Image (cartoon, rainbow, N blue to C red):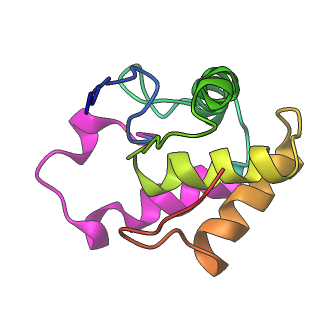
Amino acid sequence: MISLLEVDENLHEFSYLSERKCANTNMDDRKAWVNAYWKKMDYQHKDADDAESFENLYMRVQAFHEKLKVLAENYVQKNLAVFSHGQFLQLLMMQIQQPQPISKDLMQQFRYNLIYQPIRNTQVFTY
């Protein structure tokens, strides 16, 4: 049995807050920053130069989704497992189920899903 492992550069956490600013803080410390980020609903906004915009996340998800489509052709009778962070998977599943261009509406729906239909730890999806 041959097993291959690949780490895709697009599969990483959505870091929309500055990592420098968030160093040595807890969830309560960051709550106001989180709320301010989502209140803006500006998909191009970056909290700082070491943060990511929602548009950046969208582009990573799109790139991985295209790769997944190609891989799916080769894995019809095989198994392919993808492990990633909940926010990445949330947007990926949204784009698989109903592809949408980047927009404020998409960002709002994404935030709604994060709160009311969150991806659970170890949740499994089939594609």
Q: Is residue 73 left or right of residue 1?
A: right
Residue farthest to the front?
1
Say which quarter of the image contains residue 45.
top right
Residue farthest to the bottom?
116
**Residue at the image point whose x is 54% and y is 29% from the top:** 46
**Residue at the image point whose x is 32% and y is 23% from the top:** 6
Q: Is residue 90 above or below residue 124?
A: above
Say which quarter of the image contains residue 110.
bottom right
Q: Nearest the camera: 60 or 104?
A: 60
Q: Nearest the camera: 90 or 106?
A: 90
**Residue at the image point whose x is 56% and y is 56% from the top:** 36
> Residue 77 colored magenta?
no
Q: Is residue 104 left or right of residue 84?
A: right
Region rendered in magenta: 15-39
**Rendering coords of residue 60 (x, y %):** 57, 25
Q: Is residue 46 left or right of residue 11?
A: right
| Image quarter of the N terminus | top left
- Total numbered circles: 0
**Rendering coords of residue 19 (x, y %):** 27, 37
**Residue at the image point whose x is 38% and y is 47% from the top:** 83
Q: Is residue 38 above or below residue 66?
A: below
Say which quarter of the image contains residue 33.
bottom left
**Rendering coords of residue 34 (x, y %):** 48, 58
Q: Is residue 96 above or below residue 112?
A: above
**Rendering coords of residue 48 (x, y %):** 43, 27
Q: Is residue 23 above or below residue 101?
A: below
- Magenta: main secondary structure equals helix
> Residue 30 colored magenta?
yes
